[in-house]
Amino acid sequence: MDIKITSKELKTTDAIKDYVEKKSLRLEKYFGDDVKVSCTIKTEGKDQIAEMQLVVPGNTYRAVTAHKDLYASIDKNIDILEGQIRKAKTKKDKQNMTDSIRMKDNMKTNNEPVVENEIIKSLFYDIKPISPEDAKLKLQEDFQNKFLPFINIETGKVNVMYKLKDGKNFGIVEPEA
């Protein structure tokens, strides 16, 4: 970490230098050693202003605060810079996540072979012997299913009761022989 402290109209003491270095270490955890911090301290009236700039590969973060206490101003700058870094990292992570999801979706659509004329889904039904009227009542109760296979009590053969597109009437499929 490279730290540069500049002062205008104010003497930079060792205590201030140590304090800036100590507080800047909080920023190092986000980027490692490849960080340049420049801090400018000055006074304007009764306020002491600390301006901090953090330069990392690809980004620059900046914070300026004024306070009666220089140490409080430095603390506030560190908090602001940390917030900016977290916000940028969250934004980048979110963007990477959505990009990877899009990429995954594109790979699925591009790499999957198109399946045609194949049985790709099987459904299993419990077939019970009931009358066609009972099958119709049972199908009316079930809003999700559009058909119901059953064994017709009268004929002993498998039939299928289905809802017609009008949603009010029913059809039945019976074997011929």
Image: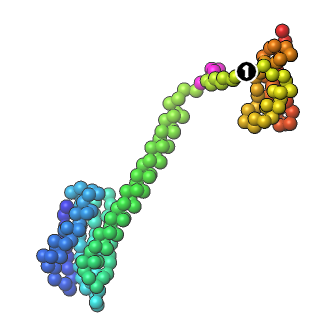
Total numbered badges shown on the rendered structure: 1
Residue 156 in which image quadrant: top right
- Quarter of the figure with the C terminus: top right
Whether 107 is among the magenta residues is no
Q: In this view, does 86 lie to the left or right of 177?
A: left
Mark 1 belongs to which amino acid? Ile
Q: Answer whether residue 50 is visible to the viewer in this image.
A: no
- Helix, strand or loop at disc 1? loop
Residue 13, position in %: x, y?
Answer: 14, 79
| Secondary structure predominantly adopted by residues drawn in magenta | loop
Classify 89 as above or below 117.
Answer: below
Image-quadrant location for residue 138:
top right
* Residue 17 image offset from top left, x and y in percent: 16, 73
Q: Mark 1 points at which residue?
A: 127
Q: Foreground: 100 or 120? A: 120
Direction from residue 163 to residue 24 in the image, left or right: left
The answer to whether 112 is drawn above or below residue 53 in the figure is above
x and y percent of residue 21 in the render? 19, 68
Q: In this view, does 35 lie above or below 176?
A: below
The answer to which image quadrant residue 61 occupies is bottom left
Residue that extends furthest to the bottom in the rendered view of this protein? 45
Residue 65 location in percent, x, y?
Answer: 32, 78
Residue 116 part of the magenta segment: yes
Q: Residue at left 24%, top 60%? A: 28
How many C-alpha atoms fall within 10 Å of the one at disc 1: few (<14), some, or many (≥20)? Answer: few
Q: Which residue is drawn at 87% across and 33% down?
A: 169
In the image: residue 148, left or right of residue 15: right
| Image quarter in which the N terminus is found | bottom left
**Span shown in magenta:** 115-119
